[in-house]
Each structure stands twice: as structure tokens, then as C-alpha cells.
Image (spheres, helix red, strand yellow):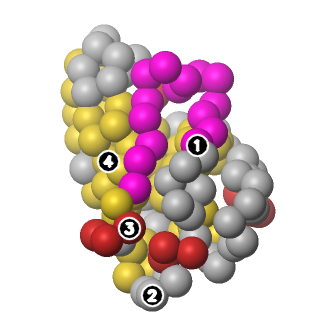
Amino acid sequence: VQLQASGGGSVQTGGSLRLSCAASGRTFRESNVAWFRQAPGKGRDFVAAISRGGGRTSYSDSVKDRFTISRHNDLNTVYLQMSGLKPEDTAVYYCAARGRVILTAPLEEVEAGYNYWGQGTLVTVSS
């Protein structure tokens, strides 16, 4: 699975952005997918994850009720709709996939739970 993240940009506090993670490879629809982010000078943190069929999602406490993860398997794409953006959301956002999981596989919230990574897209939120 190869992943390509896009949709980052600069917005003001309270604004919205939608990130996309486009995947190639026939096993994408058998993969759980997550978004992580890395703020300047910090480690990579979990943001959200979605199961292979889209029926289960998981969010970090810091983005719950503001961000929504979704997927369109026919388009091999996962989205992260971000609203109510805050300066502390400024980071490089990465999408990651754990390939060929069973339907009931847990949604991992750590980097080690994913074996495919995209290149990242920068989100900057100004006050």
C-alpha cells in the first residue's frame, strides 16, 4: 500500500480543512487507516483511526468532537475533516495504514500499529 496525504494549508483559528489520504494497492480496503500528527519539536501523536469497513472510528481526546475521519473504499481514499481548528493543531499530518487486517482488528493508536506511511501534509493554524 502506498499512501499520499494532501489538503494541508494555512487557516485561522476556528477554520476548517479536509485532509485526504489517497492509497494505491488492492489491499487498501482490507486495511485499518489512521492519521497521526507531529508538531514542531515534538513526537508523532495519534489523531484518529478508522476500521477497514468504516464502521468503527477512534479519536484522541484533543480532537474529539472537532475532527471526523471517514473513508471511501471505492476511491481508495480516507479523509480527515477538521473543524474548529486551534493553533495547537498546527503540525505535519501523516496517514498510516495497517494492511490486511481482520474485520474485528482493534484500532491501534500507536505508530507501531501501522506498517505503511504517507509523506505528510502541513497544517498551520494562526491565531
Task: Give the magenta-colored segment's residue range.
Answer: 57-71
Q: Residue at x 50, y 54 (%)?
A: 54
Circles 3 and 2, Cβ within 8 Å, touching? The answer is no
Q: Residue furthest bottom?
A: 26
Of mark 3 and mark 2, the one earlier in the sequence is 2
Circles 4 and 1, Cβ within 8 Å, touching? The answer is no
Q: Which residue is mark 3?
A: 73
Q: Viewer-proximal residue, 84 or 69? A: 69
The quarter of the picture where residue 61 lies is top right
Q: Residue at x 40, y 18 (%)?
A: 86
Mark 3 Cα shell of 10 Å, populated few (<14), some (14-19), many (≥20)? some
Percent x, y of residue 41: 59, 39
Amino acid type assigned to the residue bearing label 2 in the image: Arg
What is the C-alpha distance between the residues marked 2 and 1? 22 Å
Describe the element under mark 4 as helix, strand or loop.
strand
The label number, if any, that marks residue 19 in the structure image? 4
Q: Which residue is mark 1?
A: 57
Q: Which residue is mark 2?
A: 26
The image quadrant where one finds the C terminus is top left
Of mark 2 and mark 1, the one earlier in the sequence is 2
Describe the element under mark 3 as helix, strand or loop.
helix
